[in-house]
């Protein structure tokens, strides 16, 4: 709490440079609005806004010398103690700028990492953020900090920053290794939990989406929880999984996760890999989209890209257009449920939830069936594959070595197995319901 109070004393000059040909779909003003949201989420006060065009980044200082001089004067005039860029700066650019300004300079990654360090509350969450901060810092830990060392604490230096400035790279690497080891251990424990969940056939539905889309608000509604949701970027940091309490969905676990943002710092993705990896165990992903946001298309594309990068594209996905209460009536007329892959809701007003529930049911439903198949003696590979997937219920072999397997398998999976291999089906297919398990 003390740290957040402290940060209210920060006065920041915020800078965005518009380079030609960059991202037409996300306008410069929208990117700037999101940037301001990030700065305010970090708890800093904005003392001055600079947004200007430049043909390309300049290697030593990122912006032109004249511009740097102008900002130096502005920083003095506005009593600012922090200069924040909506861009990633190289370690040397950051250092050169700090030397001229004699003030702390923060780039976009540093800013996001700072917000994360304030928000992390669980043990694992804190470790993950610390790891990301240390990796970011390790590239910047060079001589030349002395002029700023007196300004300890506050934005950009919360978490491990302050103490690490006084240590050397060897200690830093040692700390990185030790955190990685601890995270590895918790990750293994979680893998065990995941395994027992699969065994008990409880379904996992994970909420994903751009930051501030309304994931936690929906999670609270579905699980009757009171997790902190707010009109702030990155309100949620720690993943949480809870059982649903709406009638008819009571064997489903819901998971709320950290929100995504465009240009998510790679250090964060790396550090949060363990948490994000858990999404792989999800049976269904609910992609929450703020339909009232003019940039919803760009933002949902960013999310789809991150999901692809994380190898999650093959998990069935429901697109949930949230905050319907904020959009015009004539738009709403077209919002009737069109398919099980798209649902329109207002998590805040509890609207459209029944449709969402039925979509979840639809996606969970698997046409599990029992079917005997016959394999030739030389098809041992297929046999062991089916065993490793836990699909075999019974096996018999006749005198000429023909193997007969009774499978419990999804209809689609069986069809694909049969069409790709020379396999004979024996006797009739029998569909069984999930309740038979
Ligand atoms: N009008 C309206 N506001 C909503 C709705 N759902 C969520 N909100 C508001 O949107 C803001 C963000 O909601 P959260 O649930 O914290 O969003 P989130 O996706 O969890 O955000 P992060 O955890 O920061 O990534 C809050 O102020 C919510 O009250 C909705 O259906 N309608
Ligand atoms: Mg949230």
Image (tube, rainbow, N blue to C red):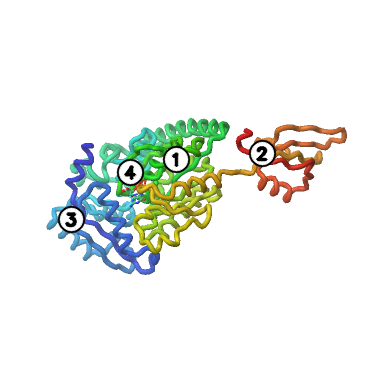
Examine the rendered structure and indicate whether residue 382 appears above or below residue 13: above
Give the mark nearest the N terminus, 4 or 3.
3
In the rendered image, which residue does mark 3 sit on? Answer: 47
Q: What percent of the width, then of the height, locates residue 174?
A: 38, 34
Cα distance, mark 1 to mark 3?
A: 39 Å
Q: Residues within 10 Å of mark 2 (few under 14, many from 20)?
A: some
**Residue located farthest toward the right when viewing the structure as drawn:** 400
Element type at mark 4: loop
Q: Give the mark toward the camera: 3 or 2.
A: 2
Q: What percent of the width, then of the height, locates residue 277?
A: 49, 41
Depth check: give the residue in front, 6 or 146: 6
Report the residue at 19% width, 47% height from top.
147
**Residue located farthest toward the left when viewing the structure as drawn:** 77
Cα distance, mark 2 to mark 1?
A: 28 Å
In the rendered image, which residue does mark 4 sit on? Answer: 229
Q: Give the mark toward the camera: 4 or 2.
A: 2
Cα distance, mark 4 to mark 1?
A: 14 Å
Q: Give the mark toward the camera: 4 or 3.
A: 4
Depth check: give the residue in front, 408 or 47: 408
**Is the CB of the residue bearing disc 2 within 8 angstroms of ligand 1?**
no
Q: Give the mark toward the camera: 1 or 3.
A: 1
Give the mark nearest the N terminus, 4 or 1.
4
Cα distance, mark 4 to mark 2?
A: 41 Å
**Is the CB of the residue bearing disc 4 within 8 angstroms of ligand 1?**
yes
The numbered mark at residue 255 is 1
Residue 35 in the figure: left or right of residue 337: left
Q: In the image, ligand 2 is in what quadrant?
A: top left
Give the mark nearest the N terminus, 1 or 3.
3
Cα distance, mark 4 to mark 3?
A: 27 Å
In the rendered image, which residue does mark 2 sit on? Answer: 432
Give the mark nearest the N terminus, 4 or 2.
4
């Amino acid at each position: 709490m003390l740290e957040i109070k402290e940060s209210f004393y920060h006065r920041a000059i915020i800078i965005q440079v518009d380079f030609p040909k960059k991202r037409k779909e996300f306008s410069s003003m929208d990117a700037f609005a999101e940037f301001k949201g990030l700065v305010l989420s970090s708890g800093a006060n904005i003392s001055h806004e600079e947004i200007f065009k430049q043909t390309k980044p300049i290697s030593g200082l990122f912006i032109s010398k004249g511009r740097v001089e102008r900002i130096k004067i502005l920083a003095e005039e506005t009593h600012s103690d922090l200069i924040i860029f909506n861009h990633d700066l190289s370690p040397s650019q950051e250092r050169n700028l700090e030397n001229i300004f004699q003030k702390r300079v923060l780039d976009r990654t540093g800013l996001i990492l700072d917000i994360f360090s304030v928000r992390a509350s669980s043990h694992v969450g804190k470790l993950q953020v610390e790891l990301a901060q240390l990796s970011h810092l390790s590239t910047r830990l060079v001589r030349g900090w002395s002029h700023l060392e007196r300004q300890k604490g506050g934005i950009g230096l919360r978490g491990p920053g302050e103490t690490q400035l006084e240590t050397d790279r060897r200690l830093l690497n040692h700390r990185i290794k030790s955190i990685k080891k601890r995270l590895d251990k918790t990750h293994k424990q979680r893998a065990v939990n995941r395994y027992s969940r699969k065994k008990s056939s409880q379904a996992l539905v994970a909420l994903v989406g751009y930051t501030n889309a309304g994931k936690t608000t929906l999670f609270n509604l579905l699980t009757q929880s009171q997790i902190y949701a707010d009109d702030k970027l990155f309100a949620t940091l720690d993943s949480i999984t809870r059982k649903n309490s709406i009638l008819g969905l009571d064997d489903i676990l819901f998971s709320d996760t950290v929100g995504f943002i465009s240009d998510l710092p790679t250090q964060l993705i790396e550090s949060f890999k363990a948490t994000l990896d858990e999404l792989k165990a999800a049976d269904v992903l609910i992609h929450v989209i703020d339909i009232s946001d003019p940039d919803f298309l760009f933002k949902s594309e960013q999310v789809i890209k991150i999901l692809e990068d994380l190898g999650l594209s093959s998990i069935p996905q429901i697109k949930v257009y949230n905050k319907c209460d904020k959009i015009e009536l004539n738009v709403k007329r077209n919002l009737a449920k069109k398919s099980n892959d798209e649902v329109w809701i207002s998590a805040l007003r509890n609207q459209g939830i029944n449709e969402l529930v039925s979509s979840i049911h639809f996606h969970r439903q698997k046409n599990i069936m029992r079917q005997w198949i016959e394999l030739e003696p030389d098809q041992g590979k297929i046999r062991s594959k089916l065993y490793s997937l836990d699909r075999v219920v019974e096996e018999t072999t006749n005198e000429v070595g023909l193997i007969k397997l009774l499978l419990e398998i999804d209809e689609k999976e069986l069809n694909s197995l049969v069409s790709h291999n020379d396999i004979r089906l024996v006797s009739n297919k029998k569909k069984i319901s999930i309740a038979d398990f």
